[in-house]
Image: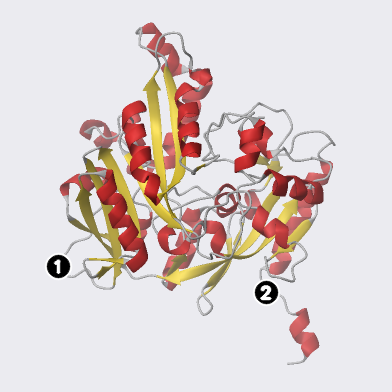
Amino acid sequence: MSARMVSSWSPPWRAAYDARVADLRRQYAAIPPGAPVRLAKATSNLFRQRAATSTPGLDVAAFDGVLEVDPVNRTAEVQGMTTYEHLVDATLPYGLMPLCVPQLKTITLGGAVTGLGIESSSFRWGLPHESVIEMDILTGDGQVLTVTGAPGDPHRDLYYGFPNSYGTLGYALRLKIELEPVLPYVRLRHVRFNTAQEMADAITEIVKSQEWDGVPVHFLDGTVFSATEQYLSLGEMVADRGTMTPSDYTGMDIYYRSIQRKREDLLTIHDYIWRWDTDWFWCSRAFGTQRPLIRRLWPKDKLRSDVYWKLIAWDRRTKFSAKSAKLRRKPAREEVVQDIEVPIGKLADFLDFFHREVGIEPVWICPLRQRDPSARWPLYEFDPEETYVNLGFWSTVPLPPGTTPEDGRVNRRIEATVTELDGRKSLYSSAYYSPEEFWSIYGGDSYRGLKMAYDPASRLLDLYDKVVRRR
């Protein structure tokens, strides 16, 4: 084959994809200067309420779909609005999965890269953006740039600055990602620890050796039920189920409750990936779906995180819960829906604070470590030699008289404590930082340079305006 023929070859999906890109660029150009630019998406996993706008959002529905899976090179070409549910459905038939699959089915690949994501493989592979080989990004100035992060890439700075930019530098339209081989089943061991420090010590050992009691650990997360009851769930991929029958947590049984009851368990790889989605971790209890009678009547295909999210969105619009609580003379409650990361050595300190001053249970924990210590991701920078632990907690807490949810009393205290412990807080939910503190944590100097280079007219929102001022 000649060099000319090689250079002119394009994959079968390219022409249709290019047509979608051209249409999106026309939509973008039609938005009046000064008008807010947003995506018209049917689903969201953000817990930040934003100001309403009458400007139509960019229609990106056509960018949900896997373009190609390459089982030989273990890569996938994926459009940016593809949900992880669709992505996993496309890769599992090849015995492959993305290196990191966030827990909820409707999280999109582009969203997980620009807004971060995490899962129980993150102690081995880091976060989703660390397995991206290249991206097509629609930038704030209307260009579509292919970025790779390679030393010769003229847009290398955008590749590394894109994670944690939350759509304020541009939108990922296509991503080429790495995949890893999987086996049909995941054998689980739920190991109890009586103190947070004992659990932290075990995490340190597992991250270093990637095994526990001589058995490989491919997946690692944990659940804290109280200061004296916490578990690490250790997952090993296996080819044979042996004498065990795979559990099913998509019906009457509830996964997180099994952690307290079972020392060992077995799930198919598909059900392991989505073990948390059925009950939105444990947040489905707010809708009564963990009560046996209600669960029996609730349609099985509606036991999903996106269904619960729609109920939450309805409650926010109508303020039904707040009005009901006021009629019953119940105290006002503050929504505390956060994910934070602290260094492993500060895990026990944070949990001591959390049990004492917040009191939400359970708490999800997930260790992570930067995959490539030489990389620098300036908008969410970690010590590359350190193991961190993500803690997720999602509920409401009662407020003392004289305070209102808008004050953010508990959330502000959490932010301050995380900063004191050299940690980071994810920005998918409410944030209360001052501009000075925010930019000192989230790469202000790097962000300003990226904004000037790729969105000089500020057609997209500023990151602080979007995540703190909620514009």
Q: Quadrant of residue 339?
A: top left
Residue 45 horizontal/vertical position (percent): 51, 40
- Quarter of the figure that contains the N terminus: bottom right
Of callouts 1 and 2, the N-terminal one: 2
Residue 169 horizontal side relative to residue 227, left or right: right
Amino acid at dot 2? Pro
Q: Give the vertical position of 163 relative to 312 (above or below).
A: below
- Quarter of the figure that contains the C terminus: top right
**Callout count:** 2
Q: Quadrant of residue 242?
A: bottom left
Residue 140 horizontal/vertical position (percent): 77, 47
**Label number found at residue 158:** none
Q: Which residue is drawn at 38% across and 7% down?
A: 327
Q: Quadrant of residue 143?
A: bottom right
Q: Which residue is drawn at 51% across and 74% down?
A: 74
Residue 357 horizontal/vertical position (percent): 36, 26
Q: Which colour scheme is used?
A: secondary structure
Residue at mark 2: 11
Front residue of 257 and 11: 257
